């Protein structure tokens, strides 16, 4: 712990150890301090200068030079206050750079809509939108994907920062066991996930401040996208997402029926309610058609339902979805 004592104020282990030694041995000479920390006078002199410059240590008059420590609570409070001022200046500078960066990208301040062309440029802007989010990300997820569909480290970073992530998945995007497992990992990390049988679009909204959608929803691979800033169009996109969210089915099970359905049954029920096709469910869960038919029959019996749609309604009413 002592090795990192002064790290928060920009000083390293050597300075921390030396400061503790000066505290315990006031009026010590450079030679005495060097011996106490198992070093040499030449090596500790730069550390002593940094401690003196920071106000933690004072060099006394006379020869040989002797050092004494300022009261820790007074010196550290002053250092913390200075560091906070530095950080505030850094924050203001970062915001200024951000505004200049966005202005340079758009070519004109105040542009409400921007055309982004090329997969590389689109990917870069998506990453910037995610990294810049402070409160909320709203996402409509649908194939095809730029990169691996089972890797999105930025989202986990956002979730750790407390940014809310709402994702609507097109059911076709959940096909495959690896994809479904990754989605469940995101949900376990805090993602709010829902699914629609066919949404066939992509959308990204950051903090209800900016959004991006493909130029064409029909393209097999997006090569151009529309970037939208605060405007009535952005409001319309947010409203569109919220309406889709209300229609979508949660992918996570919020209630439990351990005596009636096991975990695999609950996973199957969730995917059925989300509109995932039988073939995709079989691949995602790694089961056979016969096993799926048997499990679906069991679920419908438990829920007293004649159709899968009724089963979904009954499960929702019971709080299982």
Image (cartoon, rainbow, N blue to C red):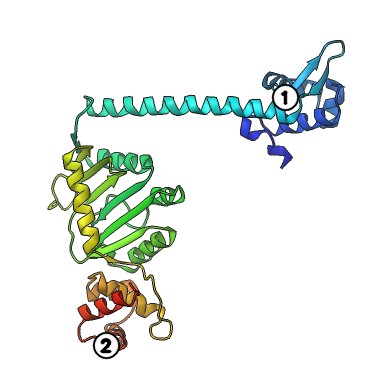
Q: Position of residue 287 (x, y in %)?
A: 33, 79
Q: Residue at x 70, y 21 (%)?
A: 55
From this view, report whether residue 315 is shown above or below residue 221. below
Q: Disc 2 marks which residue? A: 304
Q: Earlier in the sequence, mark 2 or mark 1?
A: 1
Observer-side mark, 2 or 1, equals: 2
From this view, report whether residue 169 is shown above or below residue 97. below
Is 271 in front, or is 38? Answer: 271
Q: Residues within 10 Å of mark 2 (few under 14, many from 20)?
A: few
Query: In the image, 206: left or right of 238?
Result: right
Name the quadrant of the N terminus: top right
Q: Position of residue 38 (x, y in %)?
A: 82, 32
Quarter of the view holding residue 212: top left
Q: Residue at x 42, y 51 (%)?
A: 159
Q: Residue at x 29, y 39 (%)?
A: 125
SS label for mark 1? loop
């Amino acid at each position: 712990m002592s090795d990192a004592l002064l790290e928060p104020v920009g000083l390293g282990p050597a300075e921390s150890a030396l400061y503790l030694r000066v505290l315990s041995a006031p009026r010590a000479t450079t030679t005495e301090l060097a011996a106490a920390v198992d070093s040499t006078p030449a090596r500790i002199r730069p550390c002593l200068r940094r401690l003196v410059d920071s106000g933690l240590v004072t060099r006394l008059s006379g020869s040989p030079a002797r050092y004494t420590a300022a009261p820790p609570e007074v010196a550290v409070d002053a250092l913390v206050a200075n560091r906070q001022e530095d950080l505030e200046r850094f924050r203001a500078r970062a915001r200024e750079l951000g505004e200049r960066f966005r202005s340079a990208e758009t070519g004109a301040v105040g542009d409400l809509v921007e055309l982004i062309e090329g997969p590389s440029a689109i990917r870069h802007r998506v990453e910037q939108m995610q990294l810049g989010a402070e409160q909320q990300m709203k996402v409509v997820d649908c194939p095809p994907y730029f990169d691996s569909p089972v890797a999105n480290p930025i989202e986990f970073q956002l979730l750790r920062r407390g940014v809310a992530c709402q994702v609507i998945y097109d059911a076709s995007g959940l096909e495959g066991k690896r994809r479904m497992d990754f989605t469940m990992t995101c949900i376990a990390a805090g993602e709010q996930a829902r699914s629609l049988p066919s949404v066939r679009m992509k959308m990204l909204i950051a903090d209800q401040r900016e959004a991006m959608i493909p130029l064409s929803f029909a393209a097999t691979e997006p090569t151009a996208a529309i970037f939208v800033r605060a405007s009535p169009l952005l409001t319309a996109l947010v409203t569109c997402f919220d309406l889709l969210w209300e229609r979508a089915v949660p992918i996570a099970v919020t209630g439990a029926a351990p005596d009636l359905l096991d975990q695999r049954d609950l996973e199957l029920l969730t995917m059925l309610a989300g509109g995932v096709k039988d073939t995709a469910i079989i691949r995602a869960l790694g089961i056979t058609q016969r096993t799926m038919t048997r499990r679906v029959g069991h679920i419908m019996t438990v829920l007293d339902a004649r159709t899968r749609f009724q089963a979904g309604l009954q499960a929702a009413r019971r709080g299982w979805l």
